[in-house]
Amino acid sequence: MRVMVPSLLTEGTIPFLSFDYWHQRLSNLLDTAQLSHAQFRTIDSLMTQLERLQTRSAAA
């Protein structure tokens, strides 16, 4: 959670951890982990945030 956004927000350079990497990592957690409701909400929020950042990055 603390690393995702900073790893994607780089000033004019390629992110060192890509959108695809984070999407796969979060998807794997949703698919394989036994999550509490709070953990599920956190991952869902991160997925939403990732989609917004990816859309903003594509538009720039």
Image (cartoon, rainbow, N blue to C red):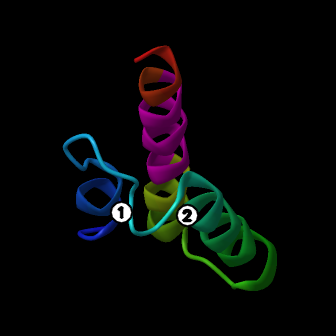
Is residue 14 found left or right of 21 in the rendered image?
left
Q: Is residue 36 above or below residue 55?
A: below
Is residue 11 found left or right of 15 in the rendered image?
left
What residue is at 51 percent from the left and 38 percent from the top? 48
Q: List x then y, in percent, for residue 28.
A: 73, 75
Name the quadrant containing residue 37.
Answer: bottom right
| Boundaries of the magenta span | 45-55
Q: Between 43 and 14, which is closer to the camera in this rendering?
A: 14
For this orientation, the residue located farthest to the bottom is 33
Q: Which structural element holds mark 2?
A: helix
Q: Is residue 1 above or below residue 52?
A: below
For this orientation, the residue located farthest to the top is 59
What residue is at 66 percent from the left and 76 percent from the top? 29
Question: Main structural element of the magenta stretch: helix, strand or loop?
Answer: helix
Q: Which structural element holds mark 1?
A: helix
Mark 2 or mark 1: whose residue is earlier in sequence: 1
Q: Is residue 46 above or below residue 51?
A: below
* Residue matched to label 2: 22
Q: List x then y, in percent, for residue 50.
A: 48, 44
Q: Amino acid at mark 1?
A: Met
Q: List x then y, in percent, for residue 12.
A: 26, 40
Near mark 1 (Cα within 10 A), the count class, few <14, some 14-19 or many ≥20, is: some
* Residue matched to label 1: 4
Asked if marks 2 and 1 touch (Cβ < 8 Å), the reply is yes
Query: How many numbered marks appear?
Result: 2
What residue is at 45 percent from the left and 46 percent from the top? 45
Residue 51 sits inside the magenta stretch: yes
Q: Amino acid at mark 2?
A: Trp
Q: Between 2 and 60, which is closer to the camera in this rendering?
A: 60
